[in-house]
Amino acid sequence: MSRLDFTDPAVLDAIAAALTAAGVDGIEIAQSSRTLRLVVAGKPPRATVHLDAGPAAAADIVTAPMAGLLDLRTVPSDLPRIVRAGEILACLRVGPVLVPVRASKACTVTRCLCDADALVGFGDRLFDIEARP
Amino acid sequence: MSGDATTVPAARSFDTVLIANRGEIALRVLRACKELGLKTVMICSQADRDAQYGALADTFLCIGPGSAGKSYLNQEAILLAARLTGAGAIHPGYGFLSENAAFSAAIEAAGMAFIGPSAASISTMGDKIAAKSAMMAAGVPCVPGPDTALPDDAAAVQAIAAKIGYPVIVKAAGGGGGRGMRVVLEAQHLQEAVSLTREEARQAFGSPALYMEKFLQHPRHIELQVLCDMHGNAVWLGHRDCSMQRRHQKVVEEAPAPGIAPERIGPVAEACLTACRLIGYRGVGTFEFLYEDGEFYFIEMNTRLQVEHPVTEMTADIDIVQAQIRVAQGEPLALGQGDVTTEGHAFECRINAEDPETFLAAAGTITGVALPSGPGIRVDTHVYTGYKVPPYYDSLIGKLIVHAPSRPEAIAAMRRALAQTRIDGIATNLPLLRALFDDAAFAAGGTDIHYLETWLKQRSAA
């Protein structure tokens, strides 16, 4: 186990930032059943990941890391599509600048959740993916 | 002094305004834009993305995570959002980036309009020493003390304090909000106070520059609302009393300030307008004064829209936010000083999501809301049943404003309005506000800036 000081605001900030970056916008702790639930950002009804739900769920989402126009021209459009970790899934266009959106892990992209050239905001859901071993 | 006083800045036409703020003030600005026929882009953080008010904007765009530093204070993300959405102007609201000179400059450099003053004006007024110097040049009354930074030489500092007369207050030139200041009652404590404040200023504000003034013992906080265009026109819209403060945070504001004779404040207001013309000020601004024994002493100028602007809107019958936008579009003021009249009396209560006893911020979900209505009652708020108060931002969740023909009638109206107001599910300061409006000294008017803190201590001791 680590020796993190959980009373240190800097440690809490770092944890909060990591959870936020992962799309988590809330933690629910139910002590009677001894479960911890991470509430993932999204449109209602919100997706909930149950950490004590047995085998890890394979379905996941890719969210926009910033605001921009979703540019799908640089990637193949056929779905489902198997991608490697780090592979470009789409780009976000801001003026002449294209910012790549990459897969954080090897996965299968099953669905694109936005139209091409749509204006998307930080944290908007872009793709449904299924993790591959 | 600003270098833009001699030239009229180029007005920029725009039909879309990006609102770089959140909560009640974002809604307030949105309303003004709609009434002027302008399209709106509202930005938000991840913590605010489910807020219902976002649906009222033409575009609602999330630009970053919940922490303000990564969203509402993220200049690059805001400028990118403006570019993405075709906004031609950015309204900063209050707080966040509203008094950030670099932000104003970056917006103008990107070919958009900043709905507020120039970067030069913001810089001048953000530096307490430069601001005091500008005010003295315009004849605005200032607190006794030099308009230059304190020297490093301890003996010279002692001489300045002796000339002013104790008690004195030592302040950071770049400070504000009650931080970076110390009161010194006797000469023997001066050197230590200067050393501590200088180090605090260096760390908190990036500059060790300090200045010193006479410390007033029982002042009131009186402020003047001004409105200036790009063509050298400037008017003042009356005065406010914001003495009811806790830890330098205003709790209740009123307009006009009770017991201030027009012949006393008129010349002060004229000097403020002279200062505006001298620095080439544009947009809305507020001159804040301490007032004691019939004398006004300039504290600072806020180069933005104030939280308490509605009390002036109610008494002067002017939409200040619309006027602010029209100025940014290059329009000359639609009224001269002779057209400005004020009527009746207005109060504003700041409704905060906080414990009324401990003042700790209270995040959580609002489970029920009842708001007052009727003639002379205005509620500026973004909350509703089911709204989740996020933990990241200021605790202000609404403003309750009343307007009546006289101060006693306005107090009675506010008592009724507060009795009708209910916000369930989270702690708020409503009980404190109700108790305050039942207080005899407050009802008599003219209480000083220390009154509320003393009153709170006496209540907790009882």
Image: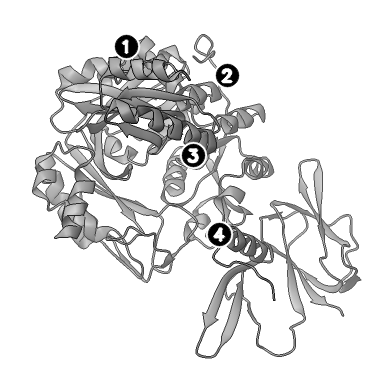
Density class for disc 3 (Cα within 10 Å; few <14, some 14-19, many ≥20) is: few
The spot of residue B312 in percent (x, y) is 28, 35
Residue B237, above or below A38: above
Mark pair 1, 2: CA separation: 29 Å
Mark 1 vs mark 2: tell me if same chain.
yes
Q: Position of residue A100 (x, y in %)?
A: 82, 54
Quadrant of the rendered image containing residue B102: top right
Q: What element carries label 1?
A: loop
Question: How far apart are the two marked residues, 2 and 3, measured between alpha carbons?
Answer: 22 Å
Specify the amino acid type for callout 4: Pro
Asked whether the beta carbons under mark 2 and mark 4 sit within 8 Å of each other, the answer is no
Residue beneath disc 3: B37
Q: Residues within 10 Å of mark 2 (few under 14, many from 20)?
A: few
Residue type, mark 2 in image: Ala
The single residue placed furthest to the front in the displayed view is B188
Structural distance between the alpha carbons of marks 3 and 4? 45 Å
Do callouts 4 and 1 point to residues on the same chain? Answer: no
Residue holding disc 2: B10
Q: How many marks?
A: 4
Kindly indicate whether the residues beneath marks 2 and 4 are on one polypeptide chain. no
Q: Earlier in the sequence, mark 1 or mark 2?
A: 2
The residue located at (35%, 70%) in the rendering is: B425
Q: Residue B139 carries which label?
A: 1
The residue at the point 35 percent across, 28 percent down is B190
